[in-house]
Image (spheres, grey):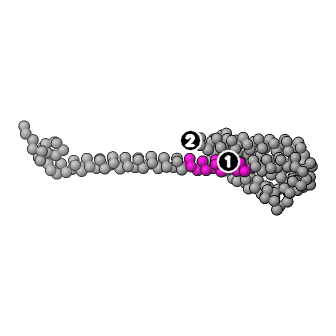
Amino acid sequence: MAVNLAETCLLVSGLKSSDCASWVQAWGSIGAICAAWWIASRQYKLGQRDAHQKEIGIRRQLVASISNILEFSLVIFERVMALQHADICEFLNYKVDSQQHSLRRDAFAVDSYLAALQKIDSGELYDSVMSEQLMLATFALDVLRQHLDNMRSIDHPHNMEPAYVFGPISGAFAAISKARKTYVDSIFGIP
């Protein structure tokens, strides 16, 4: 039995041309639906990937900013701790506002760093260790701020309480150092 392909529709013989048109339209509609689903699914996946990459970038920027704040804070800590062994001239020069590194400027910087850290929601860090280090660093900066406030009323470096410098200030310095290491280590380890 010979079949004329011109007389068949979708390789099924015996269909009228109007039936054939309906079948072609049905299969075309099914193909269009499948193509639309595939395109939408692909766009959704690409959007999810882009959103995830953007979130990672924002987290990296946040962690890098915190790390920078902690690094700058360490410099102030070191300067303040060195003043315990300073002579009266060095100490008074630090208290004079005309110096590049003065008590007033360091106090302003510490207040700014502390305000910045206090604005950070620890939930944005997505890591309990980094959240804990953020809280410890905030506390340590507050200890430094209180020490700088106390230094304003001191007229000689030997009048600073050694127990205070070696106790809370040294502990706060260690906390800031540890927090900074945690943040530096995590900058490139953010998933």
Q: Amino acid at mark 2?
A: Pro
Is 167 included in the stretch rendered in magenta?
no
- Nearer the viewer's eye, disc 1 or disc 2? 1
Per the rendering, the mark at residue 191 is 2
Near-viewer residue (163 or 30): 163
Looking at this view, is 153 or 20 the one in front? 153
Residue drawn where x is 29% and y is 47% of the image? 30
Classify mark 2: residues with Cα within 10 Å, few (<14), some (14-19) or many (20+).
Answer: few
Residue drawn at x 26%, y 49% is: 28
Task: Please state the horizontal and vertical placement of residue 63, each as a whole percent of the image.
Answer: 64, 47
User: Residue 62 lies in magenta, yes or no?
Assistant: yes
Give the residues in magenta.
55-73
Residue ID at (72%, 51%): 72
Could you tell me which secondary element the residue under label 1 belongs to?
Answer: helix
Q: Secondary structure at mark 2?
A: loop
Residue beneath disc 1: 67
Looking at the picture, which amino acid does disc 1 mark?
Ser
Outermost residue to the left: 1
Res 31 seen here: yes
Residue 178 sits in which quadrant? top right
The picture places residue 7, in percent across and down from the top left corner, at 11, 46
Residue 136 in sight from this viewpoint: no
